[in-house]
């Protein structure tokens, strides 16, 4: 490979208050290649992309484009330099026409007046380059997501782009649409463009990319030629577990006697989120929901908890069929759900630790049966001590606590409702090692207390350590289940990577 | 994704507005003799000239996802300000108008800067702007001041005559401002940037659009429009009055919404605002023609139409999402 | 209440005290309260009496703003409720029926707003604008465009009467403040409202019926406006559909913001709102005492609100934080 580097990032570092998002990351993209950028949550992919596109500026390191040092300070700068980006969420304006979305901010015209005819033509030309048939006068919002994605790419290409960044462009596309997108990517590659491709889908990495870079916890794991790296090895690198490393076997005991499942679902599904899935949780059992990011883990949890409406499927609690159409229903039936998005869906930032902690219990009791101040303080005292929550006092606003302690308060919020089932979605994400261990100890205690736990995590070892049984999801469908002696990280990785058939 | 569906989805609000106008006008023409005439039609515009001019600016503000409650007060202020300059200080009308326009634009720019730089809610800041402008107007004079300058008589007496059809100066002013507003909204980068900001500010930012200048600019332009409306109002009434335009901001917002523009921003058409003025004028004229209906029916009908349009918009957006 | 390091009512209270002192320096008679025929008289009493309506409307507005919304229709609801009172009293109905109808009107208006905001997801400003526009027309329709004079001593008592020498209207409003405070803090309602305003998604995910809580805030706000309409009509012994409740929504929003409740929702400060309403009323009275024409009295109000909202904005907070690095911390 002697193609010159189109883009070279050397020693990129970026810190946010309390977090090191990137530390000394190198990243090289050559002209005429599709380069996959991989990593789990918090690996630093999106920070790297934002540094590249001028949304953030790096604290350390240097960026070179075709040999020249660049310092993009805004998306517009990056665009001018030839770095164009298509973001995960289509970042266009749905109420404007296709033509406008392609040309906004750089419409041809004089003295601020627009030449509609010229920019319609330009938009049409950009779409034609992608061989996409689309009415340039159509309102963007009336198009399918796939088509909107194409428009976003056309916009990115409208400037004289040399490097195209596609940040999870396939997240909401179906197979046929993905194939079309890949066709376009290959075409652009043939024209000599460098393409950075961020995705969670391993099949896609192998289908289209030439080389790949893996990040983990803000650090570079390595850069590989796609063809030289096996799927299993790739998953190992993403999850920070070498296949050769000593294997864990689960030490989480299965429940002694199999009784009636406390929570069971049959054929639970939602279009575009998860294909029909069956699951059953026994009391005193920790069941893992394994899979890479975007595999449908969170989606399944949201359906169980009534946050999203399911298209089909039945849920039963303790053997009786139940109606769950809102989290309120779920809470009343003894379910609890700790969201992965602690800030957006978990904490009430300006309210105190006490208010956050008693909130779900109070919600369950209703408006009138208010917990007295004494009862509230007793609960707080109990949980602050039991979960070792570090806070000045119970009246501190929760936003002032560290991530780990916020998470413990949220766990306490749910434990206070004395649930029969608790769903933990990435409960250890973004929190320090000590708090992680404490949360794992807590899960073990919950199990011995007879709770059923549905545990979702990207950390493969964590899943193996804590669960007695793991359901594995891949590309939005349930692909397997492992339990007992077979539950080790290697088997799990095979299932997650989709290489188990080949192996067995 | 066919051509026809794209047209219907983009133009649907405009079509609905046009149909409602035709239905209202038709109904009125059916019930009231002499309603169906060019004279009545033109009066729909001329009677609402300064309201319509204010609505043009309001349309642009609403495009950007904002709102401006100060326009009525700015009209009152400009009217008494220019009248005082001309009558009490013998300032040439042209200069007085320039100063009035500058004051309106200045207030708008100030409010826009507060809204943009400090991320303060537009409705609160423009409410404060309304208090400021109204207070300043009354500070100049609490009574109305008649304007005797000959230029005023000349301009307000001016009209275009096509055969039997007479178009008064007022209506011409409104049409000119509408045309300018249409040009700005649909044929300048500024106008399209406003729609993009109102449609999705985050996207607009990532697209590299100048959000700050657009937001501050639109309140400035709206202040200018309101001041212009105030000047047209003094031409119309031949006097300056600090209480002029009381509550007019609500009518202006109602007109914009009836014109099919989405109140949350990002979607709309200046032509719809023209239709909105016509709908507003038709209700007004019908109530006048009837003679038995009292003036307060105006507010009730406008409120009801607002409700209908807002519910239609909700329905439209919901259907789209599913 | 436990004393805290930094009470949320500190600033509004400081503003009110400063304004009162300013007046007292200008004219010592400002603070004078006399007992005449067993009734209390004096400027502070007037401020309380005249400010009672704004206080009442602001009470309801506080809860709406705490949920992250706003209600622009309160002024129109005041006018409708006043009109309903006048027409019913004219028709010879009893005071009880009249009051029930007026408050019922407010409840109805609030339910309409709540339905639009909480159930249909219309933005609060947009949803309440409808009733703001149409409401005044409805009020005028009810009284047929007339200013109806009310001749009912018991009705007038509500606004202008005295109970044990103390004016009745402020007593009533203060009692309502106290009742609301207890209803919110002795039940979980206050917590739920603050939670919805602070993070609606998180509240919903924790099992709260967020839409119901929001609707309730608008309904309560409507009821407050309805009762304020009663007081407004009783105060002038007439239903003036044109002027009643004019700019009331502004004063109420101002009172809430000045009182320390953020427009973005979340924590609310009921006592702060009461102080904010009194601050605004005192400002109006001050202008009057200084001989400023009433028509330009809005100017200082506008400056006050710009100042307060700037102080509350994050950007200015950061600037100030930089200027005075935490001295009084710890």
Image (cartoon, rainbow, N blue to C red):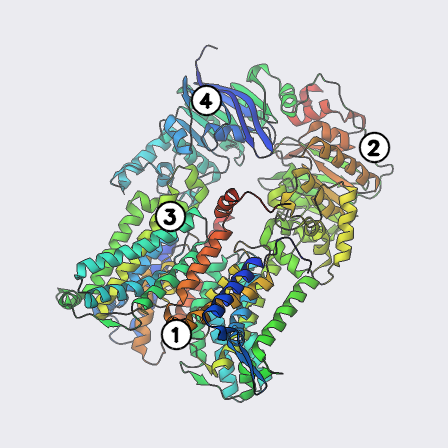
Q: Which image quarter: residue A3?
A: top left
> In percent of the image, x 26 and y 38: which residue is there?
A109
Q: CA distance from mark 4 to mark 2?
A: 51 Å
> In percent of the image, x 83 and y 42: which residue is there?
A450
Q: Are marks 1 and 3 in contact (CB under 8 Å)?
A: no
Q: CA distance from mark 3 to mark 4?
A: 33 Å
**Callout 2: residue from which chain?**
A
Residue closer to the observer: A247 or B8: A247
SS category of the residue bearing label 1:
helix
Q: CA distance from mark 2 to mark 1?
A: 75 Å
Q: Is residue B109 left or right of residue B39?
A: right
Q: CA distance from mark 4 to mark 1?
A: 67 Å
**Which residue lies under the disc numbered 2?**
A253
Q: CA distance from mark 1 to mark 3?
A: 36 Å
**Callout 3: residue from which chain?**
B
* Marks 3, 2 in one chain: no
SS category of the residue bearing label 4:
strand
Residue closer to the observer: C52 or A84: C52
Other residues around mark 3 within 10 Å, as few (<14) / some (14–19) / many (≥20): many
Marker disc for residue B297: 1
**Which residue lies under the disc numbered 3?**
B215
């Amino acid at each position: 490979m002697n193609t010159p580097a189109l883009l070279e990032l050397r020693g990129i570092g970026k810190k946010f208050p309390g977090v090191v998002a990137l530390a000394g990351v190198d990243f090289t993209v050559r002209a005429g290649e599709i380069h996959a950028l991989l990593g789990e949550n918090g690996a630093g992919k999106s920070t790297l992309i934002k540094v590249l596109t001028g949304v953030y500026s790096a604290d350390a390191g240097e960026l070179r484009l075709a040999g020249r040092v660049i310092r993009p300070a805004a998306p517009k700068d990056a665009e001018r330099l030839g770095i164009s980006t298509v973001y995960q969420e289509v970042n266009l304006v749905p109420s404007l026409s296709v033509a406008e979305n392609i040309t906004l901010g750089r419409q041809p015209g004089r003295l601020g007046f627009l030449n509609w005819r010229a920019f319609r033509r330009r938009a049409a030309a950009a779409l034609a380059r992608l061989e996409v048939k689309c009415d340039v006068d159509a309102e963007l919002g009336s198009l399918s997501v796939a088509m909107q994605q194409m428009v976003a790419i056309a916009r990115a290409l409208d400037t004289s782009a040399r490097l195209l960044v596609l940040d999870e462009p396939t997240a909401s596309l179906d197979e046929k649409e993905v194939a079309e997108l890949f066709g376009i990517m290959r075409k652009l590659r043939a024209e000599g463009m460098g393409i950075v491709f961020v995705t969670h889908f391993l099949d896609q990495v192998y289908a289209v990319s030439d080389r790949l870079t893996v990040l983990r916890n803000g650090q570079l794991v390595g850069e590989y030629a796609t063809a030289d790296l096996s799927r299993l090895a790739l998953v190992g690198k993403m999850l920070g577990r070498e296949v050769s490393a000593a294997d864990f076997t689960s030490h989480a005991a299965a429940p002694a006697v199999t009784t009636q499942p406390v929570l069971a679902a049959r054929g639970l599904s939602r279009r575009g989120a998860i294909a029909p899935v069956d699951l059953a949780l026994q009391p005193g059992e920790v069941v893992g929901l394994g899979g890479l990011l975007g595999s449908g883990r969170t989606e399944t949890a949201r359906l169980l908890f009534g946050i999203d409406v399911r298209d089909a499927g039945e849920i039963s609690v303790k053997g009786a069929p139940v109606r769950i159409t809102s989290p309120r229903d779920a809470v009343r039936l003894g379910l609890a759900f700790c969201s992965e998005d602690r800030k957006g869906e978990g904490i009430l930032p300006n309210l105190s630790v006490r208010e956050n902690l008693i909130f779900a219990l109070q919600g369950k009791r209703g408006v009138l049966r208010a917990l007295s101040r004494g009862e509230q303080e007793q609960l707080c005292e109990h949980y602050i001590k039991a979960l070792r929550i570090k806070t000045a006092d119970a009246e501190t606003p929760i936003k002032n606590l560290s991530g780990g302690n916020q998470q413990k308060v949220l766990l306490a919020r749910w434990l206070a409702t004395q649930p029969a089932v608790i769903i933990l979605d990435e409960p250890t994400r973004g929190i320090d090692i000590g708090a992680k261990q404490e949360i794992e100890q807590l899960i073990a205690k919950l199990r011995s207390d007879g709770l059923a736990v549905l545990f979702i995590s990207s950390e493969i070892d964590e899943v193996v350590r804590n669960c007695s049984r793991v359901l594995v999801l891949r590309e939005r469908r349930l692909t397997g289940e492992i339990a007992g002696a077979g539950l080790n990280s290697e088997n799990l990785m095979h299932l997650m990577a989709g290489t188990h058939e080949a192996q067995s | 994704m066919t051509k026809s569906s794209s047209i219907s989805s983009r133009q649907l609000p405009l079509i609905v507005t046009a149909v409602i106008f035709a239905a209202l006008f038709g109904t009125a023409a059916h019930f009231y003799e002499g309603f169906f005439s060019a004279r009545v039609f033109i009066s729909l515009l001329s009677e609402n000239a300064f309201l319509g001019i204010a609505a043009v600016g309001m349309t642009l503000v609403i495009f950007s996802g904002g709102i401006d409650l100060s326009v009525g007060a700015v009209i009152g202020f400009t009217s008494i300000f220019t009248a005082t300059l001309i009558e009490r200080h013998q300032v040439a009308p042209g200069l007085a108008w320039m100063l009035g326009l500058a004051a309106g634009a200045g207030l708008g720019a100030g409010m826009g800067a507060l809204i943009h730089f400090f991320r303060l809610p537009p409705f609160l800041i423009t409410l404060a702007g309304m208090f400021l402008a109204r207070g300043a107007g009354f500070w100049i004079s609490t009574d109305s001041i008649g304007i005797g300058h000959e230029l005023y008589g000349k301009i307000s007496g001016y009209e275009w005559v096509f055969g039997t059809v007479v178009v008064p100066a007022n209506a011409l002013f409104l049409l000119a401002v509408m045309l300018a507003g249409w040009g700005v909204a649909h044929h300048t980068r500024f106008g399209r940037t406003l729609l993009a900001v109102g449609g999705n500010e985050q996207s607009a930012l990532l697209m590299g659009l100048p959000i700050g200048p657009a937001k501050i600019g639109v309140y400035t332009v709206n202040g200018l429009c309101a001041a212009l409306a105030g000047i047209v109002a003094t031409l119309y009434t031949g006097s300056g009055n600090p209480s002029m335009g009381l509550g007019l901001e609500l009518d202006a917002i109602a007109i914009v919404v009836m014109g099919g523009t989405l109140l949350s921003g990002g979607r709309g058409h200046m032509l719809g605002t023209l239709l909105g003025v016509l709908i507003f004028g038709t209700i007004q004229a019908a109530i006048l023609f009837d003679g038995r209906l009292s003036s307060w029916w105006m507010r009730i009908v406008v409120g009801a139409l607002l409700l209908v349009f807002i519910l239609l918009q909700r329905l439209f957006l919901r259907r789209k999402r599913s | 209440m436990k004393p805290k390091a930094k009470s949320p009512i500190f600033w509004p209270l400081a503003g009110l005290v400063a304004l009162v002192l300013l007046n007292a320096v200008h004219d010592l008679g400002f603070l004078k309260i006399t007992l005449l025929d067993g009734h209390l008289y004096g400027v502070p009493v007037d401020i309380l009496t005249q400010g009672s309506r704004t206080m009442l409307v602001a009470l309801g507005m506080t809860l709406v703003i705490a949920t992250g919304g706003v209600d622009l229709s309160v002024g129109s609801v005041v006018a409708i409720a006043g009109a309903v009172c006048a027409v019913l009293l004219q028709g010879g109905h009893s005071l009880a029926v009249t009051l029930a109808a007026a408050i019922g009107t407010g409840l109805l208006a609030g339910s309409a707003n709540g339905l639009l905001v909480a159930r249909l997801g219309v933005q609060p400003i947009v949803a309440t604008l409808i009733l703001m526009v149409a409401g005044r027309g409805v009020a005028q329709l009810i009284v047929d465009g007339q200013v109806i004079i009310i001749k009912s001593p018991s009705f007038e008592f509500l606004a202008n009467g005295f109970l044990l020498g103390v004016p009745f209207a402020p007593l009533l409003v203060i009692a309502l403040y106290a009742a609301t405070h207890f209803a919110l803090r002795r039940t979980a309602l206050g917590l739920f409202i603050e939670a919805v305003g602070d993070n609606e998604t998180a509240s919903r995910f924790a099992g709260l019926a967020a839409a119901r809580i929001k609707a309730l805030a608008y309904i309560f706000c409507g009821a407050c406006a309805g009762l304020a309409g009663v007081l407004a009509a009783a105060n002038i012994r007439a239903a003036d559909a044109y002027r009643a409740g004019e700019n009331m929504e502004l004063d109420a929003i101002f009172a809430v913001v000045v009182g320390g409740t953020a427009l973005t929702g979340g924590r609310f400060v009921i006592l702060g709102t009461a102080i904010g309403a009194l601050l605004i009323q005192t400002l109006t009275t001050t202008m009057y005492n200084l001989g400023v024409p009433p028509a330009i009295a809005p100017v200082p109000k506008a400056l006050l609100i710009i100042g307060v909202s700037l102080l509350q904005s994050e950007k200015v907070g950061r600037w100030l934080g930089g200027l005075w690095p935490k001295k009084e911390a710890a």
